[in-house]
Image (tube, rainbow, N blue to C red):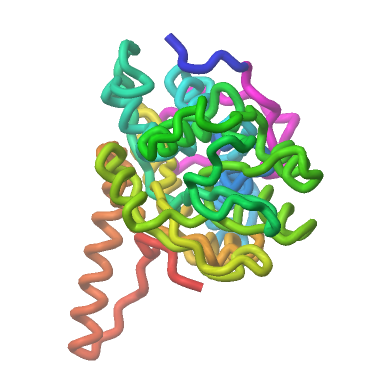
Amino acid sequence: MSITSRPPRPIALAFLLFLTYSPWPAWSGTLQTPEMHYFRIGTATSSGTYFAVGGLIANAITSPPGGQPCEHGGSCGVPGLIAVAEATTGGLENLDLLRTGALDAAMVQSNLAASARQAVGLYAGHPPFTNLRAIATLYIETVQIAVRDDSPIRTIPDVRGHSLSVGEKPSAILVDAQTILGSLHLPPTAYRPVYLRPGASVDQLVDGSLDAMFIVGGAPFAAIDDAARRLPIRLIPFSAEEAQTVHRSQPFFTDVTIPADVYSGVPATATLGVGALLTVRADLDPDLVYGITRALWHPTTRRALAEGFPRGRFLPLGPAHDTGSVPLHPGAARYYQEAEAIARQADQAAGGGSPVPAPAPATLPGP
C-alpha cells in the first residue's frame, strides 16, 4: 500500500542527447562491458536542494560509451551508465517509487527511510521496506522557517495564529512540520496551515499573503535563496530548550547552525538537521553500486558540486558511511572498506617516507 499516490513527475536528464536510447533494463553481469543503461534517481521539486544535488550526482556517475576515460579528462562515472534526476514531490513519493521499482535510487531523509524500513510512525500498518539500503549520507538537511524581515514572528511560538506554509499534501516537509511543531505544542490548529510547494510559498511570502514558510532541505535552499534576493528575510532560530524537546521524540534530528550569509543578510541561525540519504534496493547489483559509490566520492564530484550548486561550499557533507539505522548496500560497504584500508596504508607510508597512490576518498573533501 502506497503512502503517496502521485504519478511519476517528468525527468531531468543528465545528458539530453541520450533521450533516444532504449528504456532501462534490469542490470545484470559485471561492469566490464560498457552497455547503455539508464539509472533513475528520485529527487524532489525543481526549487529544492534534492533536485539540484540529484542532477549533479547524475552527471557525476554518468559515463556514456565512447567517451574519454577519467584519467584523460573524461567522465569518472560508471562505464555505460546514463543517470537521470527525476523531479518528484520528495522523500515520501521517492520511497514509494523505489519500493515498486519505478526508481533505481531515491534521495530521502534518514528519519523517513528508517520509518519505512521498520514500518513505524507514518508507515505503521504498511509492509516494512526491509530491502531498503543506503549508498551514502550526502549532507545534512536543515529545518528552515523563513519570514520577512519586518515580520512580528521572532520565535517559533510566535507562529501561533499566523499563516504558515508546511509543504504539499502529502510531502516529507509536511510530515516534518507537523512532527516538529507538534512536539513544541503547536498543532495545526494553533496556526493557519497552507499547503504549497516551496516556489509558490516564496511568491506568497514576498507579496505578503503568507506569514511564514517551513521547509527541510540543504542550505542554501533555492526557493529561500530566491526570497532573500527579492526582499530582506529572517530565519527563525530554535532555542536550546526547543531543540532538546524535539530530540526527545525525534532522535534523528541533531543540533546544527546555518552559517551567516548563506542567504544574503541573514545571520547564523541555530536550528535542527537530519541526514539526506541516497538509497537503493538491496537487490541492486553490488558491482554497479560499488561503481556508483566510487564515482560519487571522486574529487571531481566535489568540484562539480562547488561549481554547479549555488554556494555549494555551505553544504555539510558526510560522514558518508554513517547512514543511521538503514544498512549500507554491500557494494557501497565494499567501497568504503577499501577506501579506508588504502587511507590507512597511505598514513603508514607517509610515516615511513614511502609514497602511496592517493585513494578515491570515502567522503568529499572540504572546499
**Magenta segment range?**
7-35
Residue 139 percent coordinates (x, y): 44, 54
Q: Is residue 34 magenta?
A: yes
Residue 45 percent coordinates (x, y): 64, 36
The residue located at (22%, 82%) in the rendering is 349
Residue 194 higher or lower than 154, as above or below: above
Residue 53 higher or lower than 187, as above or below: below
Q: Is residue 39 visible?
A: no
Q: Is residue 98 left or right of residue 349?
A: right
Residue 126 higher or lower than 250, as above or below: above
Q: Is residue 324 left or right of residue 313?
A: left
The residue located at (23%, 90%) in the rendering is 353
Res 14 → quadrant: top right
Q: How many numbered discs sit on the rendered protein? A: 0
Residue 91 percent coordinates (x, y): 49, 32
The residue located at (38%, 22%) in the rendering is 122
Q: Is residue 42 left or right of residue 293?
A: right
Q: Is residue 247 visible?
A: yes
Residue 19 percent coordinates (x, y): 74, 32
The residue located at (47%, 53%) in the rendering is 296
Secondary structure, magenta segment, majority class: loop
Res 311 → quadrant: bottom right
